[in-house]
Image (spheres, grey):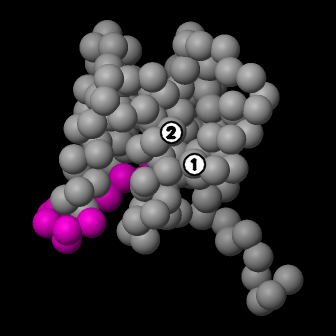
Amino acid sequence: MWLVAEDETDIRVLITTMISVWGYQAVAFENGQKVWDWLDQIEADAFIGTLPDLVLMDIRMPGKKGNEVANRMRSIAKLDRTPIALMTAFSLSDGERKEMIDQDGVDTIISKPLPDFDQLRQLLQALIEKKKTPTHQNGV
C-alpha cells in the first residue's frame, strides 16, 4: 500500500490511478491534517490495517505541511523506515531541501510537474529498494 497526500484533486486522482496501474493499492488523503489524524490512530494502536510501503506527499497542503507530517512519521517506530517522498511545485533553496531531508527525515523531494509515468515509477521503486538496504552491517 502506498499513501498519497495531495490537496489538488486532479493530481491526487492521477497519482492514485498510476499507483493502481503499477499494481499497488493507494490510500489517498486530501490534506496533511487528515494524515496527522491517521497518525494519531497509529500512535494509539487504534489503526487496524496495512501500513504504507511508501509515502508520497505534497509539501504545501492545508493544515499540516508534508515535511511536518514526515517529521512526525519519523518519530513513530512503525513508520521510521518507510520511504517518504515529498512533491512540490515551488522552488526550494538548497538549504530548505537539506533541512527537510536532514531534520524532517524526508528521503527525496520531487519537483512538479512530476516526471513521466515510467520515470516516476522507477524513482519511487528505487527509493523503496534503497530503504530496504541496511545502512550498516555488523558494525561496519
- All told, the count of numbered labels is 2
Percent from the top left, x then y, of residue 138?
77, 89
How far from the left and from the top, in percent, is residue 4? 36, 34
Q: Amino acid at mark 1?
A: Asp
Question: Which of the 4 quarters of the picture holds residue 11?
Answer: top left
The answer to whether residue 25 shows anywhere in this view is no
Nearer-the-camera pick, 48 or 67:
67
Measured as percent of width and height from the top left, residue 73 is found at 43, 55
Residue at numbered disc 2: 67
Q: Which residue is mark 1?
A: 104
Q: Which residues are magenta?
A: 43-55
SS state under label 1: loop
Verify whether residue 63 appears in magenta: no
- Quadrant of the drawing holding the C terminus: bottom right
Residue depicted at x 57% and y 48%: 104
| Residue at x-position 33% and y-position 48% | 1
Q: Amino acid at mark 2?
A: Asn
Do the numbered discs 2 and 1 sit on residues whose CB atoms are within 8 Å?
Answer: yes
Whether residue 137 is visible to the viewer of this picture, yes or no, is yes
In the rendered image, the vertical position of residue 10 relative to residue 129, given as above or below: above
Q: Is 58 on the left-hand or right-hand side of 41?
A: right
In the image, residue 131 above or below residue 12: below
Separation (CA) of disc 2 from disc 1: 6 Å
Residue 106 placement: quadrant = top right
Q: Main structural element of the magenta stretch: helix, strand or loop?
A: loop
